[in-house]
Amino acid sequence: MVVSYTQEHVYRHPWHRVTAAAWRKFTDADARAAPLSHILEVHTLSRRVDAGEGQLHAVRAISGRAPPLPLVLRGLLTAGAGGAGAGAVVLCVEHTAVDGPERAMRVVSRNANLRGLVHVEESCSYRPHPERPDEWTLFRQDTSIRCAPLAAVATWVAEMVERRCAEKFEQNASKGREVVETICQRLAISDHDHSVGPR
């Protein structure tokens, strides 16, 4: 079984501000202290800029605390999944492509470990909102979560793991959107201060 869902959100900020905030989401000190405290480290593995085309391609490794599994499952799955119980660390690889002239940013993330238990893929896009392209940004997130087949675990347990992962993932996605919104507000104030200048 695969649990899939799609979420859309409208940021009432221009595309350049939202994408700048999205880049800072995991490294913002305030976000790391509270809403995204499950994020442990972020490392840029590669970055390539094509100035002629106005494109940026980057790959980052992001580590975070895996959501705790229900107590009844921890013993069963820890042995088979390489430590997926309480306190496990999940490593994700994030591929980002930004096309400045097209005002498009796409981020695709996949878990690189714990794949013996679960496969998670998230694809996010940031584009100008079709109705107010210079003022708002449309964010779309497509996520799929698939529990790996575990011979020792019944189908209902695999479905329970998928649902639990999906619930936690949706909660964290909501926190991520809140962080992007907060950073956008700070950037808007900064943009305004710079446009007004000293008096």
Image: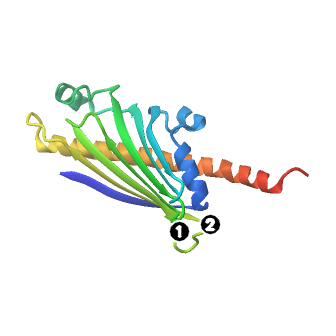
Q: Secondary structure at mark 1?
A: loop
49 left or right of 83 in image: right
On screen, residue 69 above or below 8? above
At label 1, the amino acid type is: His
86 left or right of 50 in image: left
Viewer-side residue, 120 vs 199:
199
Q: Residue furthest front?
A: 52
Image marks 1 and 2: residues in contact by CB distance under 8 Å: yes
Residue 63: where, in percent of width, then height? Answer: 40, 33
123 left or right of 176 in image: left
Which residue has dot 2 on it?
135
Residue 99: where, in percent of width, then height? Answer: 49, 59
Residue 163: where, in percent of width, then height? Answer: 27, 46
At label 2, the amino acid type is: Glu
- At a point 84% along the width and 52% down the height, the residue shown is 197
Residue 89: where, in percent of width, then height? Answer: 35, 29
Which residue has dot 1 on it?
129
Q: Residues within 10 Å of mark 1 (few under 14, many from 20)?
A: some
Q: Is residue 114 visible?
A: yes
Viewer-side residue, 150 vs 122:
122
In which quarter of the view is residue 70 placed? top left
Q: Secondary structure at mark 2?
A: loop
Q: Residue furthest right?
A: 199
Q: Of marks 1 and 2, which one's residue comes earlier in the chain?
A: 1
Q: Residue furthest bottom?
A: 131
Cα–Cα span, label 1 and label 2: 8 Å
112 left or right of 61 in image: left
